[in-house]
Image (spheres, grey):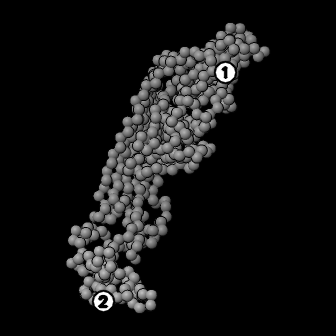
Amino acid sequence: MFKRAKYLVLAFVVGATLLAPVFVQPLNAQVLYGSVVGTVTDQTGALVPKAAVTITNVNTGQTREGTTDDAGYYSIPNVLEGRYDLSVKMAGFRPYLEKGVDVPINTVTRVNVNLQLGPVTESVTVETNAAVLQTTKSDVSVNLESRAMENLPLSNFRNYQTLINLVPGATPARFQNAEADTPGRSLSTNINGQQRGANNTRLDGSADILVTMPHHAVYVPPVESIAEVNISTNNFDAEQGMTGGAAVTVVTKSGTNEFHGSFFGYHNNSATRAFIWDENRSGVKKKPKNILNIDGGSIGGPIKKNKLFFFADWEGTFERSNRFVRASVPTAALRTGDFSQFLGDQILDASGNPIMVATTEGVSVPLQEGMVFDPYSGNLDGTGRAVFSDGGALNVIPQARLNGPMMTLLDLVPQPNLPGENSNYFNSGTQRLNRNNIDSKINWNRNDKHQLWFKYSVMRATFSSGGFSLGKAGGACL
């Protein structure tokens, strides 16, 4: 008998508004975004106030502006993850342009600028290549970029959480619970010796925690949809509360001014494996079905250039997994009440003489190991009880004394297919999991101080399993 369960997770319908007034004081990055800060000086090292600083997203054309204060310092907070070009303009100085400034999430990116005297018709252009040491924040964190997740080998259903194994202080990630109640197949890990429930995952700013089992992420986004993952393990910012182990922030991809897409397929089956020990012992000649297919794709691009963008992805997981069981079932003799095979040596008294006990047929016999006594005979304190006997055979329960309803249930249990009284039954079956993940995201750059994005994610999983593989007594599969 199969059990069927369907899971529907409506992840998010989110609108995020970014209001960007110019702040001249130092400001840490928000967890979901980054910040760009720095100091503008001239050739002599003197501070340059009132300089106009502009960053432009190279993929979407979105611009953000800031102005240096009297100390030459500028800060542009709440910057969406991505690559930017940074320009600085000031009367009497050559325009400055620095290309390829990467702004990760939960990170303060510092870009210090040195302006040179000269006419505005001349400019200074700098190509950014090297990573800049993080000196503005004190938290301990690791950033996983989209390229790493798409190219590094990912086990466990192509789960990005596999790469948390690379984070210092992390124990190897492992599955939790069964596929029946957690088809998303979230992984758990312990960070810096903390218990696994102390980790906190946020997906595009929303808490991604299964309330009944907080060590689970309720929704595991497909790798094709992830732009960046930030994992903080110490000295968390205040907005990363509810965290004792790791604060995991996941940001999904958005559309850009160019159309991009991807398609992929992954296949594995039992033809590539050898027979396991139990299969060889049981004489199995054909390997049980064990197939895993993971297919999917993504597409994103502009709806209106520099203004409106879309991104969507789908990932389907289709698993046919072999499950097997070794169990102990009653032999043919035990089903008829015959326990004579368990009779052992005689039990003697202190003088070495046999101890005589009565049988249910009124005969006295020497006491032996393994005897089965009639619970309805003898005294209330257990003394004087009679050993079962039928037709002179000891340790045999008469047919009339066998419980009718229990015998009916016992008839449903399959016969042994292996020798012996213990671990004498082997069976295997196929467990089925069909799971579809769909994500969609719309970004709208209303103006340079106002951006909106909307996100919808859904996981639909159908899981088919059986009981404990005892045929009519408990299902045909495992």
Q: Quadrant of residue 24?
A: top right
**Residue 58 location, x and y as percent?**
57, 24
User: Would residue 168 be visible to someone looking at this image?
Assistant: yes
Q: Mark on residue 364?
A: 2
How packed is label 2: few (under 14 Cα within 10 Å), some, or many (20 or more)? some
Q: Quadrant of the C terminus?
A: bottom left
Looking at the rendered image, the disc whose residue lies closer to the viewer, 2 or 1, is 2
Which residue is depicted at the point 69% across and 17% down? 40
**Residue 363 location, x and y as percent?**
27, 89
Mark 1, secondary structure of its residue: strand
Which residue is depicted at the point 41% across and 71% down? 423
Q: Please give left or right for residue 63 compared with residue 359 in the image.
A: right
Q: Amino acid at mark 2?
A: Ser
Q: Amino acid at mark 1?
A: Gly
The residue that mark 1 highlights is 38
Which residue is depicted at the point 45% across and 87% down? 350
Spatial CA span between label 2 and label 1: 101 Å
Q: Quadrant of residue 86?
A: top right
